[in-house]
């Protein structure tokens, strides 16, 4: 009787472990899709494509224009907004199609992510593999993804009436939620991965989480640089056109606007916070190098060094698309390594 019960317990444990592994792999794959979504979103920004679709049609918008008449209709809508009238007046239909496809691809990828999450989510819940708190967490992630779509449209609307681009504040909010969703799925996947056994010293958990938060805030500051196209100015390093604090920073009476609404300010903020993140990463490596977290701390330090290298290269080259997207991808890798380090110390 006891042996039979033990066998059933082992079998049940093995089955649960296999189910958790399946869900972890699925969530890691979703992280990759969200990362791709962020990178494609960066491309739409760098190619000035984000305002090419002036309507939000969550279902019918999945179908692109299929005839010349449909293309002309979409182009006519674009001609009514300030970006066309003040920046792209005289644009050809062929050029419009190029920016349209970037934005359509970004939105289509968002829809694909929704389906790729919802269908397995329903399956795991229906088969009992995801129950209770886990099912609630997965449901929360799905709702967060839906909110991200609505937030994206809210961002786009800021550039359809009185501006020739979107609000940098709304851009930062849109990117911030995407990165938050990426981080939440990555953390839950680590929770579910059977071979992930946190064994770092518990005392390093809060510092590791603090480092991850600092990296997250640095990503948000990068969104302001992208939103104001500040990567095209002050293309020198380590100084900004020969000065540590550039001309145009805190012009006149210092105020909130000076921190987030001038190219000089947002690029300076992003640079300074990068040095802060680098310092924190080095400190974390020093305190963790003789613990079970040494490999994870080393990964964070290597990732931050490479990310700074990409950032410097991008700014010196005036942020070409390739380097800009690599820098954005590097930010997600860095954020993921910091979360991995924090997860290792969670229950140590």
Image: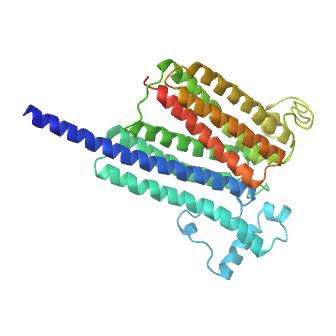
Residue that appears at 74% across and 29% down: 275
Figure quadrant of the C terminus: top left
Instruction: Give the side of residue 201 with respect to residue 77, left or right.
Output: left
Q: Is residue 119 above or below residue 59?
A: above
Task: Between residue 89 and residue 309, name the one nearer to us.
Answer: 309
Location of residue 53 (image quadrant): bottom right
Q: Is residue 172 above or below residue 288?
A: below
Instruction: Give the side of residue 234 with respect to residue 97, left or right.
Output: right
x, y (%) of residue 52? 71, 64
Q: Is residue 316 above or below residue 253?
A: below
Residue that appears at 56% across and 39% down: 336
x, y (%) of residue 273? 73, 31
Task: Between residue 88 and residue 216, name the one nearer to us.
Answer: 216
Q: Is residue 276 above or below residue 41?
A: above
x, y (%) of residue 257? 80, 36
Location of residue 15 (image quadrant): top left
x, y (%) of residue 29? 48, 51
Residue that appears at 64% across and 47% down: 329
**Residue 50 can be seen in this image:** yes
Residue that appears at 44% across and 25% down: 199
Task: Between residue 27 and residue 103, name the one nearer to us.
Answer: 27
Figure quadrant of the N terminus: top left
Instruction: Give the side of residue 322 with respect to residue 290, left or right.
Output: right
Number of numbered discs present? 0
Q: How is the image coloured?
A: rainbow
């Amino acid at each position: 009787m006891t042996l039979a019960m033990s066998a059933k317990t082992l079998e049940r444990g093995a089955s649960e472990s296999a189910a958790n592994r399946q869900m972890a792999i699925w969530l890691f794959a979703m992280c990759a899709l969200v990362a791709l979504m962020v990178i494609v979103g960066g491309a739409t920004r760098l190619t000035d494509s984000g305002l090419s679709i002036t309507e939000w049609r969550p279902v019918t918008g999945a179908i692109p224009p299929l005839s010349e008449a449909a293309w002309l209709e979409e182009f006519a809508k674009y001609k009514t907004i300030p970006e066309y009238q003040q920046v792209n007046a005289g644009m050809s239909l062929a050029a419009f199609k190029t920016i349209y496809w970037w934005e359509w691809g970004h939105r289509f990828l968002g829809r694909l992510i929704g389906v790729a999450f919802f269908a397995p989510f329903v399956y795991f819940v229906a088969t009992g593999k995801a129950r209770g708190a886990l099912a609630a967490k997965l449901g929360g992630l799905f709702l967060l993804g839906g909110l991200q779509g609505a937030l994206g449209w809210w961002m786009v609307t800021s550039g359809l009436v009185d501006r020739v681009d979107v609000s940098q504040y709304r851009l930062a909010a849109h990117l911030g939620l995407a990165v938050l969703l990426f981080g939440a799925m990555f953390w839950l996947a680590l929770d579910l991965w059977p071979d992930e056994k946190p064994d770092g010293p518990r005392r390093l958990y809060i510092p590791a989480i603090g480092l991850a938060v600092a990296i997250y805030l640095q990503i948000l500051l990068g969104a302001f640089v992208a939103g104001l196209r500040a990567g095209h100015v002050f293309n020198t390093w380590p100084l900004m056109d020969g000065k540590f604090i550039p001309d145009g920073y805190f012009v006149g009476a210092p105020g909130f606007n000076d921190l987030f609404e001038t190219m000089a300010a947002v690029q300076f903020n992003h640079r300074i916070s990068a040095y802060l993140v680098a310092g924190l990463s080095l400190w974390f490596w020093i305190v963790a190098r003789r613990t079970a977290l040494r490999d994870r701390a080393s990964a964070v330090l290597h990732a931050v060094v490479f990310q700074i290298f990409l950032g410097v290269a991008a700014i010196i080259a005036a942020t070409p698309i390739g380097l800009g997207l690599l820098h954005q991808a590097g930010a997600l890798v860095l954020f993921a390594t910091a979360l991995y380090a924090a997860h290792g110390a969670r229950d140590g």
